[in-house]
Image (spheres, coloured by chain):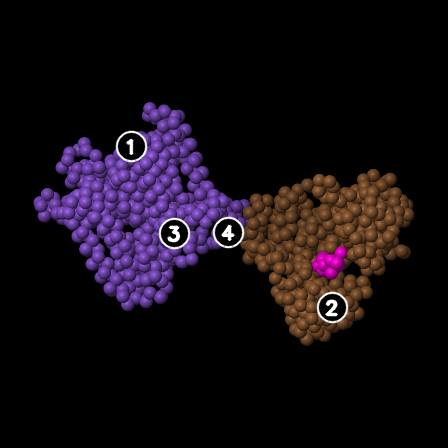
């Protein structure tokens, strides 16, 4: 079955690439010949045309499609195209409700989701099965990443759990220790579920791997408070972060505003510097603008006098959230030079992330990359739960699934289940007698029961097989 | 300026005022007799009917579909009040409250005295329609009392229909005669919203209904309901006569302050009556659109209103401050409870209504100063109360705060909010314009009056100007709650009446008339 992706921009191509790795058949539709020609390297069916054209959808093979992703850079087109695609699918297949086609729409404006001030809930009227708006994940990932700058990658694992991918330095006390014995060295350290070494690539751990310098370890922690321990274990030291850090955000963009809201909620003092007076006024006039701990400054983010006046060197965190990648990099470098310990920045271009990390800026987040991950999660919603690829370990995927009564993992121990599906179970969410949900480590669980939610790591090549066994 | 538009507004406004005048005329016919009713009410009624018909005929060709321009709306509202005041003064002049043409015919008064009588009647009518509540009726100026001797209760001596008319002028002026007119002629004129905006108190008019007529209807319904409710309470609970209940309710809801005797509320000396009146004085000084919110089941939103909260806080602090000050200074023989009762009554009353339960001109300076500040601040916007309005003071305070913060952090973006809504610069400038006009007018009036009245003390001048501009009524010093304003000279009387007009229409509406551009085509 085929996946059609409307929009062959960076997001569309990223999704197409990931799906090709899963050996899925993919068709890309884009009206711009330049975008199509950039996609030539992908092994996909390329269609030049609009998603709002019956001809384009037919050429992309909508009658064979299982999923269509609307990922153009226009929110309105993406929403409108959902109903149109279902209509065309119905005409071709004769399935009146188009139940065989899953439609995913990507939007960049989170306000559209709001039921009062926007048009939400969008699923109710657009005929989209899933709406992807990754702004929350972007903010969440950036904010979590800034807590522990030494950890190379921090990703959400759902339910306030975190995946940390970190490189082992020469000072690490874990060198020479097997992955199953790390708790002997650091008592409360979270468990390691995957490892990537220079020679063997990324793989799931079975406890016997000996940790070497340069290995990438994947930990799963159930709170951000464990980040310090992970940092210490791999031989790194992060500067102290106050409970309520002082935060400078450059850009009152939708991400800047969300970040400001996030830090205000934890009690931080936040200063937002915005060069556009209209955007600055909009933030001040919004609900978070009423917060006494928020200062919105209208000025050039690169104005040295202004930054000095604002005491930028006293800030604990600086985040560049403007819509210009180059400006964000320049601002973050300036902040780093002034001694800000944690410098986060949002980038559109995925290719810049690695380069920026090499410069030494703490936490670059690619908006498009997060969006791609969010789309992939929606595509894999046949197993409802999280779906997360780990960029530093491209061979490994994390996902979650709820066990239903017919599932053949029910009644099995964690070890038996791991053996059966060939993956590592990291966490189990169980409901206790009072109906309270508890997230438990595998060691705390005897047998898996109906309606348990399991969080697991698997190798990408096993994805189809694991999905199939979880579906049953 | 399109004169036909102005003519139409004037014609209809006069016609509207004929209705209550007829009602009082009928009342007079039964109470004071045919002769008095004809000479006092019928003659002005005929005159008004003719004048209004003339205005309407003159404006027949006006294109009612054309939008009324702002300046036309403001000018016609400001001018519309003049014939209303003039018509309202007729019963006082013709009915014997002051020297009138009948006294000239019967040789009881000189021509100058009759002219003075016209001015006093004008003042009384102005004080009524603008809901100020200051009066000239006393044993030195009113022929009824001059003939009866010095020691009588001069206001109570007036014919009942005159007292009713006095109260009714306040009631009509409370929410606005033009607003009443809009109920009737909004379909005749396009752009009635501008007219309503020019007359209503406060910086903006909240639309309560889908169109202007329904907004006007809702406002008048709330106003009438509250009035009737108070009449019922005063009559059944307060044991007041029906005549007094009606009069005091009409003037309470208008935040006017006229009474039916020299002593006013003080003469009842009843905690129950004072309490009922206090509640309604407070209710009428609240933005009327909040009642609409309550009726529509959005009481929470109404109670969250920042202006309401600020207003109640101001009154509460003023009450405690005056109460404490009075107790500390050992003023009078009042007990603790009585002192607190009087300070509460005065704190609520002085912000616009102007009733008094005690002679506060004898209170310590601190309490008098608090009262003066309350007169300046006034009531809430969109209420029947006067003064600068709590909302404007709040906006001015926010502006001051913003400017201070801007000095400290020049690049900081600061939003000024009221009820969580961000104010735009235009709204702020209108408020500033109003406050600065108020200051200029108040200062120049103080200079003028202090020059005209060499014997007055500083607090006399200050409080008379503030009281007139704020439509409060009683002032301090020699113009306290037990005194009338009859000792003023004629020019001062005329000028204070003009200040009341300015105050009621919130200055800018009247100041529009002074600009030559208003009068050009």
Instruction: Determine the secondary structure under disc 4.
Output: strand
Q: Contact, CB < 8 Å: mark 1 with mark 3?
A: no
Report in which chain the residue with disc 1 lies. Answer: B
Residue at image mark 2:
A65
Instruction: Determine the secondary structure under disc 3.
Output: helix
For chain B, the rendered hue is: purple
CA separation in Å, label 3 and label 4? 27 Å
CA separation in Å, label 1 and label 4? 47 Å
Q: How many labels, in total? A: 4
> Which residue is at 42% across, 46% downward?
B291
Mark number for residue A147? none
Residue B317, image x and y in percent? 43, 35
Residue at image mark 4:
B422
Where, by quadrant of the figure, is residue A24 drawn? Answer: bottom right
Which circle's residue, 1 or 4, is located before the other in the chain?
A: 1
Q: Which residues are magenta?
A: A369-383
CA separation in Å, label 1 and label 2? 88 Å
Q: Is residue A386 above or below residue B226?
A: below
Which circle's residue, 1 or 3, is located before the other in the chain?
A: 3
Task: Confirm whether residue A337 shows in the render.
Answer: no
Residue B95, image x and y in percent? 17, 45
> Which residue is at 77% across, 51% downward?
A405
Q: Contact, CB < 8 Å: mark 4 with mark 2?
A: no
Mark number for residue B268? 1
The reply, left or right, for residue B398 in relation to residue B227 is right
Mark number for residue B218? 3
Which circle's residue, 3 or 4, is located before the other in the chain?
A: 3
> Which residue is at 24% across, 64% downward?
B57
């Amino acid at each position: 079955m085929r996946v059609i992706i409307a929009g062959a921009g960076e997001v569309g191509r990223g999704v197409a690439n990931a799906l090709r790795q899963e050996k899925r058949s993919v068709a890309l539709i884009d009206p711009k010949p330049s975008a199509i020609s950039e996609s030539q390297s992908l092994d996909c069916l390329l269609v030049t045309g609009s998603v709002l054209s019956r001809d384009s959808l037919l050429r992309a093979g909508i009658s064979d499609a299982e999923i269509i992703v609307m990922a153009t850079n226009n929110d309105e087109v993406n929403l409108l195209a959902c109903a149109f695609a279902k209509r065309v699918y119905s005409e071709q297949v004769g399935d009146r409700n188009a139940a065989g086609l899953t439609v995913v729409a990507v939007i960049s404006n989170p306000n559209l989701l709001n039921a009062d001030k926007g048009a939400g809930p969008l699923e109710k009227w657009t005929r989209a099965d899933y709406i992807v708006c990754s702004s929350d994940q972007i903010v969440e990932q950036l904010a979590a990443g800034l807590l522990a700058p030494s950890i190379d990658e921090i990703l959400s694992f759902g339910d306030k759990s975190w995946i940390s991918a970190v490189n082992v330095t020469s000072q690490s006390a874990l060198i020479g220790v097997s992955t199953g014995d790390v708790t002997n060295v650091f008592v409360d350290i979270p468990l390691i579920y995957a490892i990537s070494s220079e020679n063997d690539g990324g793989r799931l751990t079975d406890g016997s791997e000996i940790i070497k310098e340069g290995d990438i370890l994947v930990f799963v922690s159930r709170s951000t408070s464990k980040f310090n321990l992970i940092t210490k274990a791999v031989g790194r030291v992060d500067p102290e972060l106050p409970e309520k850090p002082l935060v400078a955000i450059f850009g009152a963009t939708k991400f800047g505003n969300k970040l400001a809201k996030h830090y205000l909620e934890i009690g931080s003092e936040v200063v937002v510097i915005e060069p556009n007076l209209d955007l600055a006024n909009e933030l001040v006039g919004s609900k978070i603008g009423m917060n006494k701990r928020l200062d919105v400054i209208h000025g050039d983010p690169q104005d040295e006098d202004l930054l000095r006046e604002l005491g930028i060197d006293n800030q604990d965190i600086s985040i560049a959230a403007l819509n210009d990648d180059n400006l964000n990099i320049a601002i973050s470098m300036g902040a780093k030079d002034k001694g800000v310990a944690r410098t986060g920045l949002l980038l559109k271009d995925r290719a810049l992330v690695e380069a920026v990390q090499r410069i030494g800026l703490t936490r670059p987040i690619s908006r498009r990359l997060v969006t791609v991950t969010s789309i992939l999660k929606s595509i894999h919603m046949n197993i409802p739960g999280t779906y997360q690829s780990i960029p530093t370990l491209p061979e490994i995927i994390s996902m979650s699934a709820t066990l239903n009564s017919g599932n053949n993992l029910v009644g099995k121990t964690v070890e038996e289940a791991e053996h059966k599906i060939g993956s590592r179970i990291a966490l189990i969410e169980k409901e206790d007698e009072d109906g309270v949900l508890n997230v438990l480590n595998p060691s705390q669980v005897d047998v898996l029961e109906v309606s348990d939610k399991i969080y697991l790591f698997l190798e990408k090549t096993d994805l189809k097989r694991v999905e199939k066994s979880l579906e049953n | 300026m399109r004169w036909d538009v102005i003519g139409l507004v004037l014609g209809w406004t006069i016609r509207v005022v004929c209705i209550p005048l007829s009602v009082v005329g009928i009342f007079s016919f039964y109470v004071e007799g045919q002769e008095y009713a004809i000479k006092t009410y019928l003659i002005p009624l005929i005159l008004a009917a003719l004048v209004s018909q003339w205005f309407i005929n003159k404006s027949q060709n006006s294109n009612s579909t054309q939008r009324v321009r702002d300046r036309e709306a403001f000018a016609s509202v400001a001018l519309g009040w003049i014939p209303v005041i003039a018509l309202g003064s007729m019963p006082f002049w013709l009915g014997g409250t002051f020297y009138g043409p009948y006294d000239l015919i019967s040789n009881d008064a000189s021509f100058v005295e009759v002219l003075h009588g016209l001015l006093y009647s004008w003042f009384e009518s102005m004080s009524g329609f603008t809901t100020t509540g200051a009066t000239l009726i006393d044993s030195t100026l009113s022929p009824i009392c001059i003939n009866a001797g010095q020691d009588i209760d001069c206001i109570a001596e007036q014919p009942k229909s005159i007292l009713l008319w006095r109260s009714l002028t306040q009631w009509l002026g409370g929410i606005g005669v033009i607003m009443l007119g809009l109920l009737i002629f909004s379909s005749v004129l396009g752009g009635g919203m501008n007219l309503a905006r020019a007359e209503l108190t406060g910086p903006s008019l909240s639309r309560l209904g889908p169109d202007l007529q329904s907004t006007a209807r809702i406002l008048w319904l709330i106003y009438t309901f509250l009035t009737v409710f108070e009449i019922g309470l005063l009559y059944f609970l307060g044991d007041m006569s029906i005549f007094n209940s009606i009069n005091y309710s009409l003037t309470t809801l208008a935040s006017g302050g006229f009474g039916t005797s020299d002593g006013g509320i003080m003469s009842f000396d009843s905690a129950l009556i004072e309490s009922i009146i206090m509640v309604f004085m407070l209710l009428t000084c609240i933005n009327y659109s909040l009642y609409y919110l309550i009726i529509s089941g959005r009481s929470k939103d109404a109670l969250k209103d920042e202006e309401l909260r600020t207003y109640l806080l101001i009154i509460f602090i003023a009450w405690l401050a005056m109460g404490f000050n009075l107790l500390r200074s050992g003023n009078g023989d009042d007990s603790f409870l009585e002192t607190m009762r009087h300070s509460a009554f005065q704190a609520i009353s002085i912000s616009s209504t102007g009733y008094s339960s005690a002679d506060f001109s004898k209170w310590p300076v601190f309490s008098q100063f608090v009262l003066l500040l309350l007169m300046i601040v006034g009531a809430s916007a969109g209420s029947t109360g006067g003064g600068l309005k709590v909302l404007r003071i709040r906006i001015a305070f926010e502006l001051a705060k913003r400017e201070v913060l801007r000095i400290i952090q020049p690049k900081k973006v600061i939003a000024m909010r009221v009820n969580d809504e961000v104010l735009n610069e235009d709204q702020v400038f209108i408020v500033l314009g109003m406050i600065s006009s108020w200051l200029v007018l108040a200062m120049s009036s103080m200079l003028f009056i202090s020059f005209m009245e060499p014997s007055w003390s500083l607090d006399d001048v200050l409080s008379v100007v503030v009281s007139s501009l704020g439509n409060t009524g009683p002032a301090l010093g020699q113009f306290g709650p037990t005194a009338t304003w009859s000792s003023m000279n004629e020019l001062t009387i005329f000028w204070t009446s003009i200040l009341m007009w300015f105050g009621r229409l919130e200055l800018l509406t009247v100041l529009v008339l002074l600009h030559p551009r208003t009068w050009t085509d």
